């Protein structure tokens, strides 16, 4: 069997289902083999860029708990793919990148797009080794099976990440031996988990039992664990409150009484205050406690006992574990503690009460006017986010891109119980969520939908991946916050550089008109709103067309300081979220509660 046929049939039988990429001279054998051998069980997804291909594979792995696979040809395609390979590695998403290379006989001899490292060429192996967990170049057929197994095992095991296989063009057609005896037939067979330290887990159980007010802080490692439900079940059974990090907002049902909110730089002040004032044992589960998480907790964290449950144990993280460190998969650890809790005298405790508070939106002073404005446009970002809560999917996915709009959406929204949430905070690249949404939505049941919150700057970078969603008829709604600027950067320049705006603003663009060129009304829903009334009308119309891909442009002419703690004073004003009366749905809907709060504060 030829190497390329062996690769495709193995990926097919592992049920990875999709290979995301753009074809080219040194990867075309792979696409031809998928066409011949995929059997509708393995499909090529033509993306609009290799960056998008890696982002789609990355998000497919996160959301569907599998291995994401992407590919690229040599040269520029390979370099584009590297952006997403680095994101997956930084954020621990299991990804396999297959990268074509120039034919072996031409390496170092003037080959087109040579990246062998010879004769002054780029060294692909060195480059990818620095941004991935594993990289190997297949130089002879006998290496193939071992390299493939090592790559996938590395991606799926321990702290997950990206792996890269570099395959020269001439190798695809070479004959490889049959797979060795015992070669894995399922992806699950290659995921190596560290054994749970049972003594450490039982010590943590005893510490939780004895604590006056323990709290679970859940990170993305919970979502990628063997059994995320075990963590939720333990909290519910024994009355433990829980908070989530920004990158794991859906790790605990947001409508559950045990859920106290999101923590981190865009987290809820009520959750931060509860930790500071009440908690005596903070149990960080599947979280690396990065600066994005621990920033608002820096004053109170040194005074707390902090226990950590994590699949990796870097020295700096272990030093934070003043209350103990349990090395292991979060699902395994909480299954063990759940099985041991009752006979060790653990009993349910009453849940604490907490009035949820959010930061009161504040207009930014002297921020440049933006957006593709019309006369009368006065829609505010915070107001729009509250209204958009109505059309979040009950089942499906919500993705947040980088920037002010993501900070605000993560801060103000509570997500329905049947959705996943994704934000890329590893490398934090703009445009990730736009492409990634395709990887999230592909293969989902018909009733699932996806919503993306992104800025106009991000859409200018990766927005044409919306055309991929149109091609495949995916019900993804891309919500574009159009303010003609990179809002987070403008906020920083306003606060820290005396309002000198450089390389952060751009001319107005009508994204409604741009989107209309991606598909006719029968294939793509498009809306544009600059007032609350227009947004109400758009959402009413979208409900009738939500089975289609959609683009919703929000024309914003007034900038708000995002609910991002590095930008806010310690005494920043808050309001009681959800304190208003229930809001009727439909055309007679009253203005949002937040709008009433804004008017009372004199902001409108």
Image (tube, grey):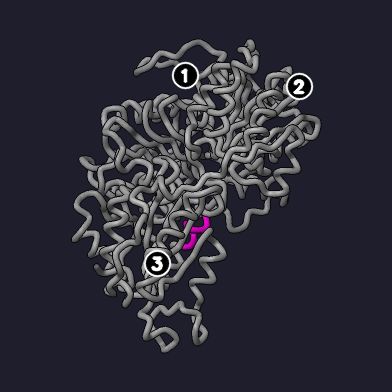
**Which quadrant: the C terminus?**
top right
Question: What residue is shown with label 3?
Answer: 99
- Please report the bounds of the magenta region as a residue range: 82-87
Q: Return the x and y of residue 100 as percentages of the image width and height.
A: 37, 70
**What residue does disc 2 label?**
277
- Does residue 359 appear in the picture of this structure? no
With 254 as the anchor, is 440 left or right in this view? left
Q: Residue at x 41, y 27 (%)?
A: 418
Judging from the image, what secondary structure is the residue with disc 3 in? Answer: strand
Sequence-wise, which precedes: disc 2 or disc 3? 3
Q: In the figure, residue 476 lies in which quadrant?
A: top left
Q: Residue, x 66% and y 30% (percent of image)? A: 283
- The residue labelled by disc 1 is 591
Indicate left or right for 500 with 31 as reference.
right
Look at discs 3 and 1 and give the one toward the viewer.
3
Rendered position, 105 above or below 246? below
The reply to whether dot 3 and dot 1 touch (C-beta < 8 Å) is: no
Front residue of 337 and 232: 337
The residues tagged by marks 2 and 3 sit, at their Cα atoms, a distance apart of 52 Å
Q: Secondary structure at mark 2?
A: helix
């Amino acid at each position: 069997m030829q190497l390329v046929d062996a690769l495709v049939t193995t990926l097919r039988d592992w049920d990875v289902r999709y290979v995301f990429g753009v074809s080219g001279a040194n990867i075309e054998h792979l696409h031809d083999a998928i066409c011949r051998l995929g059997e509708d069980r393995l499909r090529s997804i033509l993306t609009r860029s290799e960056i998008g291909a890696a982002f789609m594979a990355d998000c497919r792995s996160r959301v569907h708990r599998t291995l994401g696979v992407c590919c690229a040809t040599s040269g520029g395609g390979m370099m584009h793919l590297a952006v997403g390979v680095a994101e997956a590695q930084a954020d621990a998403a299991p990804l396999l990148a297959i990268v074509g290379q120039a034919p072996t006989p031409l390496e170092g001899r003037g080959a087109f797009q040579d990246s062998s490292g010879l004769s002054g060429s780029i060294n692909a192996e060195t480059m990818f080794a620095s941004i991935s967990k594993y990289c190997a170049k297949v130089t002879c057929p006998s290496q193939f099976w071992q390299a493939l197994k090592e790559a996938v095992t590395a991606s799926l095991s321990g702290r997950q990440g990206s792996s890269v296989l570099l395959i020269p063009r001439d190798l695809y057609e070479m004959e490889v031996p049959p797979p060795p005896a015992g070669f894995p037939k399922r992806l699950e067979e290659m995921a190596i988990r560290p054994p749970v330290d049972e003594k450490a887990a039982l010590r943590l159980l005893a510490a939780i039992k004895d604590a006056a007010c323990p709290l679970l802080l859940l990170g993305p490692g919970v979502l990628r664990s063997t059994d995320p439900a075990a963590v939720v079940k333990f909290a519910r059974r024994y009355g433990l409150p829980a908070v989530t990090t920004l990158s794991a907002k859906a790790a605990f049902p947001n409508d559950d009484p045990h859920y106290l909110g999101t923590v981190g730089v865009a987290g809820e002040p009520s959750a931060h205050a509860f930790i500071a004032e009440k908690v005596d044992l903070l149990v960080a589960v599947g979280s690396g406690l990065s600066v994005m998480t621990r920033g608002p907790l820096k004053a109170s964290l040194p005074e707390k006992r902090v226990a950590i449950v994590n699949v990796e144990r870097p020295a700096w993280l272990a030093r934070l574990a003043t209350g103990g460190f349990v090395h292991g998969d979060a699902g395994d650890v909480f299954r063990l503690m759940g099985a041991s809790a009752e006979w060790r005298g653990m009993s349910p405790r009453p849940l604490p009460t907490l009035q949820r508070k959010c930061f009161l939106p504040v207009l930014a002073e002297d921020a440049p006017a933006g957006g593709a404005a019309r006369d009368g446009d006065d829609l505010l970002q915070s107001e729009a986010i509250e209204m958009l809560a109505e059309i979040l999917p009950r089942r499906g996915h919500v993705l947040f891109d980088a920037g002010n709009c993501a900070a605000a959406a993560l801060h103000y929204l509570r997500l329905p119980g049947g959705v996943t949430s994704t934000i890329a905070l590893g490398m934090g690249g703009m445009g990730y969520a736009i492409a990634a949404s395709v990887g999230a939505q592909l293969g989902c049941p018909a009733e699932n939908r996806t919503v993306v919150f992104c800025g106009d700057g991000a859409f200018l970078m990766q927005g044409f991946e919306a055309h991929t969603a149109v091609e495949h008829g995916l019900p993804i709604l891309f919500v574009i916050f159009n303010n003609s600027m990179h809002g987070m950067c403008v906020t920083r320049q306003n606060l820290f550089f005396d309002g000198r705006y450089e390389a952060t603003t751009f001319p107005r663009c009508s994204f409604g008109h741009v989107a209309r060129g991606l598909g006719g009304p029968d294939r793509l829903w498009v809306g544009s709103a600059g007032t609350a009334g227009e947004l109400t009308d758009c959402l009413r119309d979208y409900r009738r067309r939500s089975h289609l891909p959609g683009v919703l442009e929000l024309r914003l002419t007034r900038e708000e300081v995002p609910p991002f703690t590095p930008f806010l004073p310690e005494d920043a004003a808050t309001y009681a979220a959800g304190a208003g009366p229930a809001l009727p749905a439909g055309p007679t809907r009253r203005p949002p509660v937040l709008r009433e709060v804004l008017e009372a504060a004199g902001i409108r």
